[in-house]
Amino acid sequence: MRSLTLGDMKLGLHDLLDKRSEALLSTQAGAMYAPMLAGRRKAIDALPPALTGGAPLADQLAAADEEHDGFGAAMWFLIEAYQRAPGSSAALIAAADRIRQGFIPALGDLQQSYATEADAALTRAPLLKSYKADLELFPVAGGTLHDWAAGFLAAGTHLHDLLSDRADEASSPTRKDAAGLRADALGLVSRLRAALADEVKHDKKLPRDLDAQLFGYLDQLAATRGAANAAKKAAKKGDGKAPGPEKSGGG
């Protein structure tokens, strides 16, 4: 099981301690090791998602910013179209002006820092209600401009939440600490497995396939991870071969 990552261990411990808890606790070794494994699981669950297989925070921020800027640009250009279109009523143009000044006074506002955009979203949140009548004058695919404005503000608020998470992450365990936690959890599982093997050997009442019942999922994760690692090594060896003829330019 040496190939298991911290993310694999997180999945494996949840499976062992939840789905297989009855079988685990039916043994003396399981009853002794379960609290220790639960403590390691709690510590792993508290780690930043980026350390346990989730998307890195930077990627989450970029995705939220892309959604925020996408809704914002769509709103800005729609308002611009109504303001420029011949035949737009004075009332419609006035509503468009109010929305632009309230939500996106300048297109360049969408190029500000994450923190500035997040702060603006929090400040503008009350406008969603007070500008509802204006926003609903403008139809868009699947609804009205009110839907786009709601998405715009929600994405900005999500940016704020993610930035708060980044501040928490700054004081969170380091990768070195996480690696130590992985090794500790792996060691506990290995010792539990060995103790259970001895217990099964001396207690004929326990099922002969108890090891497979308890650790089958972890073994499956290890096999999958091992195959993936082997494929990566093979790919690296392939990259080291002499390159073939390059394609000519022009497509």
Image (tube, grey):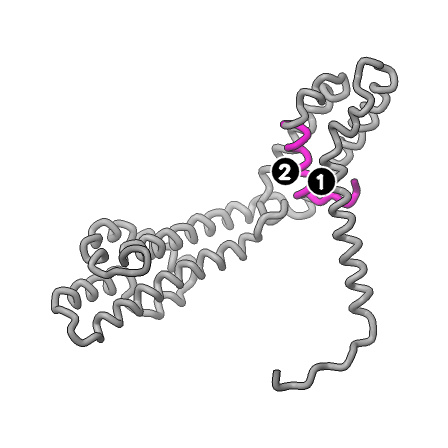
Circle 2 SS class:
helix
Q: Residues within 10 Å of mark 2 (few under 14, many from 20)?
A: many
Q: Which amino acid does label 1 sit on?
A: Arg
**On-image quarter of the C terminus:** bottom right
Q: How much space separates mark 2 and mark 1, taking CA atoms? A: 8 Å
Q: Residue at x 80, y 25 (%)?
A: 209
- Closer to the camera, 144 or 61? 144
- Closer to the camera, 1 or 211? 211
The quadrant in which residue 134 appears is bottom left
Q: What residue type is labelled 2?
A: Ile
State the image coordinates of residue 217 (x, y, percent, origin top left). Answer: 72, 35
Q: Residue at x 61, y 32 (%)?
A: 42
- Dominant SS type (magenta): helix
The quadrant in which residue 8 appears is top right
Label 2 with label 1: CB-CB less than 8 Å: yes
Q: How many marks?
A: 2
Mark seen at residue 182: 1
Which residue is disc 2 drawn over?
44
State the image coordinates of residue 186 (x, y, percent, origin top left). Answer: 75, 36
Q: How crowded is mark 1: few (under 14 residues within 10 Å), some or many (20 or more)?
A: many
Question: Is residue 27 toward the left or the right of residue 15 in the image?
Answer: right
Relative height, residue 249 to residue 141 (above, below):
below
